[in-house]
Image (cartoon, helix red, strand yellow):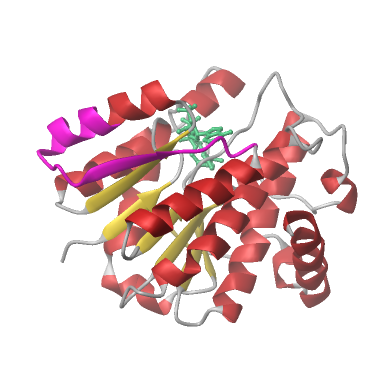
């Protein structure tokens, strides 16, 4: 059965590839990008590659939470329901490490933006019979420090990225508990996949981008995953696995959610 699927960061990398594969299977795809020209081009590319006209696109720079809120408002005006939200947009190495609000751009794009978007879109997700949220984490996970939410924090690319990827994972587990009707799964799509992010950061890769796109497609579509809410799928091992120990610590979860709510409110 055709699903309505919103994939953030679907103008490149595994998000674009997963969007194309899902469009080829006849699903309605809502794309997202930060660059209007690039997004318009990808919308047309996927329509043609998949012979599917049910492709639309929304613009927001996720380093600006106001843009995220505006995008969510527009989607709510224009779409009647969403079956699956894939929080895929992400950033690692960048020349500009500080977002407009003064915080580390990795924390804003990789964690705060999906937090804001998902909470804003929950009413649309709840209109679906089987809503799902897939949150892109990573094998790179390290303890989230309160200082990483301070203005002009000065972490290395690796440290800032790994903190943001543990933050989205911790929040996934929390969301699964808070919203038992919404299947929420955190995903490491595989390490060093052949994408723009990895090429820019390392200049080499270990696995194809298809490896990451295919697990996204599976988690979005396969019925058996409806029993897996609150779990972490580690695609380096091809199975569900243990995340960083902080993700199972109630105090750490509560502290993260409380600081996050203060920032986004
Ligand atoms: N590739 C890997 O090996 C790997 C491993 C573990 C986890 N992941 C995660 O998988 C996800 C996809 O990564 P990828 O490798 O496919 O990366 P990618 O090829 O660089 O694609 C990233 C996507 O996010 C978008 N994006 C980046 N910054 C944004 C911003 N400020 N506002 C809105 N959109 C923004 C990009 O838009 P543009 O097209 O405009 O650049 C692009 O569509 C990320 O969350 C990443 O952390 C990847």
**Image quadrant in which you'd find residue 61:** top right
Numbered marks: total: 0
Q: Is residue 262 visible?
A: yes
- Residue situated in front as seen by the camera: 198 or 87: 87
Q: Which residues are magenta?
A: 43-63
Instruction: Report x, y in % for residue 199.
Output: 51, 21
**Nearer to the camera, 75 or 185:** 75
**In screen coordinates, is 65 left or right of 220?**
right
User: Quarter holding the C terminus?
Assistant: bottom right
Q: In the rendered view, tell whether residue 95 sits above or below residue 237.
A: above
User: Which of 156/23 is in front?
Assistant: 23
Q: Is residue 113 magenta?
A: no
For residue 96, above or below residue 122? above
Quarter of the image with the N terminus is: bottom left
Counting from the top left corner in percent of width and height, residue 11 is at: 39, 31
Between residue 158 and residue 9, name the one nearer to us. Answer: 9
Residue at 67 percent across and 63 percent down: it is 170
Q: Residue at x 64, y 45 (%)?
A: 65
Q: Does residue 67 lie above or below 230 as drawn?
A: above
Whether 140 is drawn above or below 40: the answer is below
Classify residue 49 by image quadrant. top left
């Amino acid at each position: 059965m055709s699903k309505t699927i919103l994939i953030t960061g679907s103008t490149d990398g595994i998000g674009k590839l997963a969007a194309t594969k899902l469009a080829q299977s006849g699903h309605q795809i809502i794309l997202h990008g930060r660059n209007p020209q690039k997004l318009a081009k990808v919308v047309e590319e996927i329509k043609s590659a998949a012979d599917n006209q049910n492709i639309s696109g929304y613009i927001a720079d996720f380093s600006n939470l106001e843009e995220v809120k505006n995008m969510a408002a527009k989607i709510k005006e224009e779409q009647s329901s969403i079956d699956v939200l894939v929080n895929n947009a992400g950033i690692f190495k960048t020349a500009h490490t500080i977002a407009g609000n003064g915080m580390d751009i990795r924390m804003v794009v990789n964690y705060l933006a999906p937090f804001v978007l998902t909470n804003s879109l929950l009413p649309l997700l709840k209109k679906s019979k089987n809503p799902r949220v897939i949150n892109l984490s990573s094998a790179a996970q390290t303890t989230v420090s309160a200082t990483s939410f301070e203005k002009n924090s000065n972490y290395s690319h690796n440290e800032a990225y790994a903190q943001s990827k543990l933050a989205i994972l911790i929040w996934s587990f929390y969301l699964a508990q808070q919203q038992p009707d919404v299947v929420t799964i955190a995903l490491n799509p595989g390490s060093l996949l052949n994408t723009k992010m990895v090429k820019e950061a390392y200049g080499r890769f270990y696995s194809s981008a298809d490896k990451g796109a295919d697990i996204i497609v599976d988690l979005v579509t396969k019925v058996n995953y409806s029993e897996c809410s609150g779990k972490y799928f580690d695609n380096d091992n091809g199975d569900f696995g243990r995340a960083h120990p902080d993700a199972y610590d109630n105090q750490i979860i509560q502290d993260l959610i409380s600081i996050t709510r203060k920032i986004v409110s």
